Amino acid sequence: MTKTLLLSAVIAGFASVALADPSGKLVLYTSQPNADAQQTVNAFTAKYPDVEVEWFRDGTTKVMGKLRAEFEAGQPQPDVLLIADMVTMEGLEAEGRLMAYPEADTSAYAAQLMDDEGHYFSTKLITTGIVYNTNAPMVPASYTDLLKAEAKGQIAMPSPLTSGAATIHMAALTSTPGLGWEMYEGLADQGANPQGGNGGTYKAVAGGEKLYGFVVDFLPIREMAKGAPVAFVFPEEGVSAVTEPVAILSTAQNPEAAKAFVDFLISTEGQELAASMGYLPAHPGVAAPEGFPALDDIKLIDFDPAKALADDRANKEKFLEIFGG
């Protein structure tokens, strides 16, 4: 074989390796609900049948507790994380725990939804606004409407000590001119008693125990389509959002499969999957599911995840000062 032919064969061999589909075991830690996680894994493995996905699911706080223990032991297990919020990802990035993947195609997305250096990637928008019982005497249009007499003693809220979405919502609202910590002080004066997560808040409002609350969008939007006596408001000041970002750990054992998983979630196909599950896709070119306004019609409150991370302890201490431990 001539040198030219040999070189061509070597190049072709490298190209075939580079283009080969990923394979092997991929370990995923996620905070998705079980059914959504299974559907996500099924769709990914249908596309990449040579990858075997092993996954663990719990709330973001418990996922991170498990992962922290693994860090301490020097044996982190996951290749990839798919969890609730960017603030948690900012913390991991600051510790050098995330692998940069700047080659991922994020060109269609709003810049603020992605890490500048490609350490994490938003996969959907789960906004927090106002849920109300359709028997309520007032239809709120603004957060400040919850400070009116009609809402006194009738407000349910998830706790930022329990819920990542509630933590983000608190950070967003308290940084918004015209709301600030005065909004939370007013909610306390209204008799609000934040506790638990979004599921408990939704049940309290849907069941009529309370008439108003802060809650993630998909819970009331899904259930109102089934006849539940609730409605969801995107307040005039805007909504906060958790974006269920995905990231590759710097210690990933199968980085190629992890990159393929990231690519799948932010692809049009992956975003259509999110919409089919009833979530607002982060990709502006993918239609929102029934019951949601178009992405362009939703006003997002300005949010800086790095600042929220830096302020997290002080924010929670302030929250405890207002509402008690």
Image (cartoon, rainbow, N blue to C red):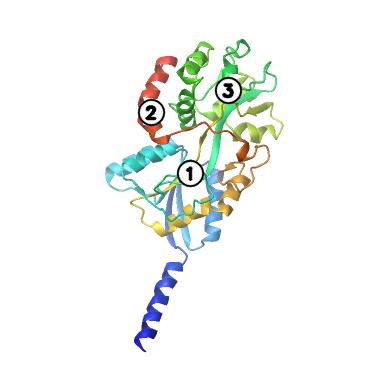
Give yes or no for contact between labels 3 and 1 (Cβ–Cβ under 8 Å).
no
- Lower position in the chain sequence, tag 3 or tag 2: 3
Task: Determine the CA span between mark 3 and mark 1.
Answer: 30 Å
Task: Examine the image and state in which quarter residue 230 appears.
Answer: top right
- Lower position in the chain sequence, tag 2 or tag 1: 1
Circle 1 is placed at which residue position? 111
User: SS at mark 3?
Assistant: strand
Q: Which residue lies furthest to the bottom in this view?
A: 1
Task: Examine the image and state in which quarter residue 296 appears.
Answer: top right
Task: Determine the CA span between mark 3 and mark 2.
Answer: 22 Å
- On-image quarter of the C terminus: top left
Q: Look at label 2 and name its amino acid.
A: Asp
Circle 3 is placed at which residue position? 213
Per the rendering, the mark at residue 312 is: 2
Q: In this view, does 321 lie above or below 112?
A: above
Residue nearer the viewer, 158 or 141: 141
Q: Look at label 1 and name its amino acid.
A: Ala
Horizontal side of residue 42 vs 133, given as left or right: left
- Residue at 42% across / 70% down in the picture? 17
Q: In this view, does 275 lie above or below 263?
A: above
- Residue at 38% across / 35% down in the picture? 306
Task: Examine the image and state in which quarter residue 150 appears.
Answer: top right
Q: Look at label 3 and name its amino acid.
A: Gly
- Residue at 57% across / 33% down in the picture? 299
Residue 19: % across, % down: 46, 68
